[in-house]
Structures are given as structure tokens and as C-alpha cells.
Image (cartoon, helix red, strand yellow):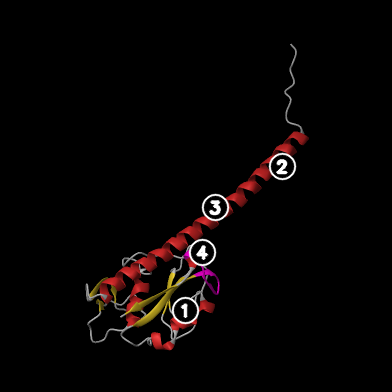
Amino acid sequence: MKKTLQKGFSLVELLVVVAIIGVLAGVGIVGYQSYTDSAKERVAIANFNSVKRFIETELTLLNNNIQTVSGAINSFNTDCASTTSAYDSEASDKNIGKFLNGAVCYFATDGYGNVFKNPYDPAGGSQVVYNQGASDLEKGQINITLFTAGARAGLPATDLTSAKVTAATATKGHFIITYATADDTEGTAGDEKGKLFELK
């Protein structure tokens, strides 16, 4: 009886296959990295726009006396864990700092509002922060800032003069919401540009 020899792959053929798999894997990893970076950017910008729209809605209701008590924002100092009442524009102890901290807590606390986690932060830290200097920001953060004067995020200094801005302890005043396009850098154009608001 004649035996037939089974022919296997040669070393050259195996090396060619391994090389092809390596090239395909390299292309796939680069494509996947680009896809994840793009997804993070889209989520971060969408959250930034959501925060601006949310604040704009609340200010429209409060500034035009449609309501005096916020339906969404509680009045906080800095501790979002403290139980406190809704922001009341007619309360004797109202101030813009409590309003802005309440807005940050709305987006930063489980069980209250919508938790926006920074997609660029591996630890999953909050995306919305309060009163951070531009040099303290991390990529992807949304900064709600009350300040006294100076240009920020592409807004001219003439829009932010001290005559137009009230102190943090005041009951009303101007603030800006900015987006960090990179560490220590606020956006200046397009969807990444900051926006000026006023609580009257």
C-alpha cells in the first residue's frame, strides 16, 4: 500500500501570513484609535452644548420672572452632597455663586441631574467644573466661571469689563461657560467657543 505524504506549510508561507496579519492589525489599531478619539470629541462637544442650552433655559425662566424658583438647580456652596433647597431668585440669601455651584452639581452628582463624565479622563472625573482658571483646565472639561474682567475663550475684554461684571458674592452677575480643547487651553472658535451669560 502506497502512503501519500501530507504537505504542510513551509516556513516562508507562515512568515508571509504572519506579516500580512501584522500589517492588517497595525492598520486596524490606527483606525480604531482615530475612531475613539473622534467619538470622545463628539461626546464632549455635545455635553458642552447641552450645558449651555440648559443654563440658557434656566436663565430665561429666572431672568424674565416666569418662575422665581429653579425647577432644576439647587442652591449649593461647594459641597454637592449637602441637601439644600432649590435656587430661589427672591430668597434673602441668594447669590450667583450658589447658583453656579448648583449648576455644576446638576451635571456632576449621581441621582441629581445628568452626570457628565469627562470622556478624556480615564478615571471618569466630572466634565463640568466651577471657577477654574484656564491654566488649571484639563482637556474636555466644561468650566462655569464667574470672573471680574479680562478676555476669555475668544470673547473681547470690552464685553467683560468690571462695569459689566458683579462679584462672586453678589446676587446677580455675569459668568462664562467655556470648553477646554486641550490642557490649559479654552476653545476660541466654532462649537468650542465660550459663551457669556448673565443672571439678573
Q: Is residue 186 magenta?
A: yes
The CA distance from mark 4 to mark 1 is 17 Å
- Secondary structure type for disc 2: helix
Coordinates of residue 41 in the picture (x, y in percent): 50, 60
Q: Amino acid at mark 2?
A: Ala
Coordinates of residue 106 in the picture (x, y in percent): 34, 70
Coordinates of residue 57 in the picture (x, y in percent): 31, 68
Reading the chain from its start, which is encountered first: label 2 or label 4?
A: 2
104 relative to 152 in the view: left or right = left
Labels 3, 4: front one:
3
Reading the chain from its start, which is encountered first: label 1 or label 2?
A: 2
User: Which residue is found at the position 40% from the left and 88% from the top?
Assistant: 163
According to the image, label 1 marks what residue?
Answer: 132
The CA distance from mark 1 to mark 3 is 30 Å
Q: Which mark is residue 19?
A: 2
Q: Which mark is residue 120?
A: 4
Near mark 4 (Cα within 10 A), the count class, few <14, some 14-19 or many ≥20, is some
Reading the chain from its start, which is encountered first: label 1 or label 3?
A: 3
Tell which of 133 and 26 is nearer to you: 133
According to the image, label 3 marks what residue?
Answer: 35
Near mark 2 (Cα within 10 A), the count class, few <14, some 14-19 or many ≥20, is few
The CA distance from mark 1 to mark 2 is 50 Å
Residue 165 can be seen in this image = no
Q: Would you say the residues marked 4 and 1 are in contact, meaning their CB atoms lie under 8 Å apart?
A: no
Q: Amino acid at mark 4?
A: Tyr
The CA distance from mark 2 to mark 4 is 33 Å
Labels 1, 2: front one:
1
Q: Which residues are magenta?
A: 180-191
Coordinates of residue 159 in the picture (x, y in percent): 44, 80
